[in-house]
Amino acid sequence: MARLFPRLPFIPDETPLSWAARLAAFHTGGRLVPFLNDLGIALMDLVAGATEAITRLCDIADQDPDPVLRNTIHSLGERQFLLRSEAFTAEMTTGPETRFCPACLAEDDTGHHRHDAMRRGRLIWRLHPVRVCPVHHLTLISRRLNKWDDITHELSVLVPEDQQALLALAETAHIQPPSPLQDYVLARFEGRSGPAWADGQGIEQVSRATEMLGGVLEFGAQAKPAELSMTDWNRASNNAWSYVRQGEDGVRSGLEMLQQRAVERGMVGHRNRFATFGMLYRWLSSPKLTKDPGPIRELLRQHIIDTTDILPQEKLLGKAVTMPKWGSITSIAKSGGVHPLTLRDVLIARRVIPAKAKDQPCSTTLVDFQIGHEVALEMRRAVAVTALPGLLNASRPMVTCLINTGLLAALHGGNGQKQGKVSRSIDGLRVEALISEINRTFQKVDTAPEGFVRLAKAAEMSRVPMEVILIGVFRHYLERVFRLQSEPGLGGLLVDPQEVKELPARISDKEMPFVL
C-alpha cells in the first residue's frame, strides 16, 4: 500500500479529525473532505469514529493506530458515544461547535509557516464540561459557521487568524482557573478515580448534576441554562463541586442552602420547588427528560420528602409519594376536612409543635404527616363532652371523672380544662371503644346480685372517689363487675361496695391519675 510521505505524526493530545485535517493541509494544501475522498475514506465514518476508517487512515499515513484510537470518540448509534471506557450521549460533547484556546494555537504556530498543518484541535476541547484551557487558564473561545461541515472542526477554516491575531485574542480572553469538575472529568478519562459518589455514576450524569446544581447555587433560582456563558458555567461547576465531592451528604448541604435562601427571600410555603431549586428541579422534573440523569434525581426527591410539605399520592420527580413524611398544617387540614387554625391549636396543646407556631403561617409550619393526619381524623370524629352523658348513660360528674383519669382523653390533650369547641370534645373512636369494652367484658345479669350496687351508690357507700372506682372497673382491679342487661353504658354497671373499699390499697400512686 502506498503511504503518505513525508510522515506527519499524530500528536497524543489531538483528535483523529484534527490529525486528518492537518494531513490534508500538509500533503495537498487543501481541505479535509477532498483529501478523504482521494483516500477512499468516508467523512461520516471518520466523524463517527469508525475503527475501520481510523485504521485505514493510520495505514496510509504510517501511524501506529493505538494512540489515535485512544483519542477517538466512537459513535455507538442513537446519539450514544464511547471514549476509552466512558459511555455518554451527544450532549457530553460540543457537537458541531468548535472550541479552542488562542494561546495554544499561537504556540502551535511558533516556528512554522504552515499554520494549517500545525494547528491541532485538542481532544479535551471536544468535551462539553471543559471550558477553560488547563495550560493558560483562558476561557475557551467557541466558533461555528452554521454549515454542514462544522462537524469536521477544521481549524484552518474556523480560526483563520494569524499568530498575532491569536495572541490578541488571548489578551482579551477571560482568565480563570479550570473548575475542579473539569479536572475530575479529564482525570476520569485518564482512568484515575475520584470521589466515590461521583465515580459511582456515569461521567455525563455527574457532570450534568454538578453543573445544574452549581447554576442555581451560583446564579440563583431564576437562572436559565441558555443564558449562562462558558465563564458562568465554569463558576457554577466550581461552586457545586465542593458539595458534590462530599457525596450525598454534601449535595444535601447544597440543597439545604438553596432552601435557606428561599426562606430569606420571604417565600411563603414549602411547595414552590421551582423557585427554590431552580434549573436543577426544572431539569429533573421535565417531561422531556428522556435519559437517566443518575442518582441526583432520587437524592433530590428524597430530600424534598424529608424536608418539605408533600401531599399523599403526589407525583414527585416521576414517582408517587405514598406516605409523606411531612405536611403543612394547611395541607393536612385541607385533606382532613378541618380548619387549619383549629388543627394548629390542637397540635400546640398536644405539644406536637411549639407554641411559637401561632406566630407562623399554617402553610409554612411542618408537622409529622402521620401524626397530623391522625389528629385531623380525630377532630372529624370529635364527640362533644356535652353529648357523652347520653351516649354512655352516665352522669356529668362521671363523664368528668372519665376524662380526669384519662379513660377518655380530650382532643387537645389537656383533660378538658381548656375552653373551646374542640377542647370540649372526645375522639369518637375512644367513646366507641369504651362502650364496646363495657358490652364485651362484663357479665350480663337480669337483676343485681345480692350486695351489688350501681357505681354512684358504691361511691356513696364506700366513700371512695369515683375516679378510683372507674380505674378499678376498667383496669380490672375489681374482680367482680356485672352489667344489667336492661340498662346500657356505665349506668348499668354493678360493683360490690366492700370490694370497692379495698381499691385505694390495691392501686399505686403511679397509676393515679390513670392514663389509658
Image (tube, rainbow, N blue to C red):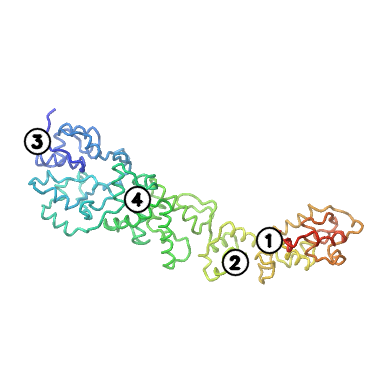
Labels 3 and 4: the sequence-earlier one: 3
| Cβ–Cβ under 8 Å for marks 2 and 3 | no
Labels 4 and 2: the sequence-earlier one: 4
Secondary structure, mark 4, is helix
Q: Position of residue 69 (x, y in %)?
A: 24, 36
Q: Which mark is residue 262?
A: none
Determine which quarter of the picture holds residue 29.
top left
Residue identifier under label 3: 6
Mark 4: amino acid: Arg
Residue identifier under label 2: 348
Residue 359 horizontal side relative to residue 1, left or right: right
Give the residue at x 82% y 56%: 478
Give the residue at x 55% y 63%: 329
- Marks 3 and 4, how far apart in space? 44 Å
Q: Residue 208 carries which label?
A: 4
- Marks 4 and 2, how far apart in space? 44 Å
- The residue most toward the right is 450
Residue identifier under label 1: 427
Is label 3 or label 1 in front?
3
Screen quadrant of the N terminus: top left
Determine which quarter of the picture holds residue 23.
top left
Mark 3: amino acid: Pro
Q: Where is residue 230 in the image (x, y as percent from the top left)?
A: 26, 55
| Cβ–Cβ under 8 Å for marks 3 and 1 | no
Is residue 407 at least partly visible in the picture? Answer: no
Labels 2 and 1: the sequence-earlier one: 2
- Marks 3 and 1, how far apart in space? 95 Å
- Marks 2 and 1, how far apart in space? 17 Å
Mark 2: amino acid: Ile
Image height check: is 469 above or below 152?
Answer: below
Q: Label 2: few (<14), some or many (≥20) within 10 Å?
A: some
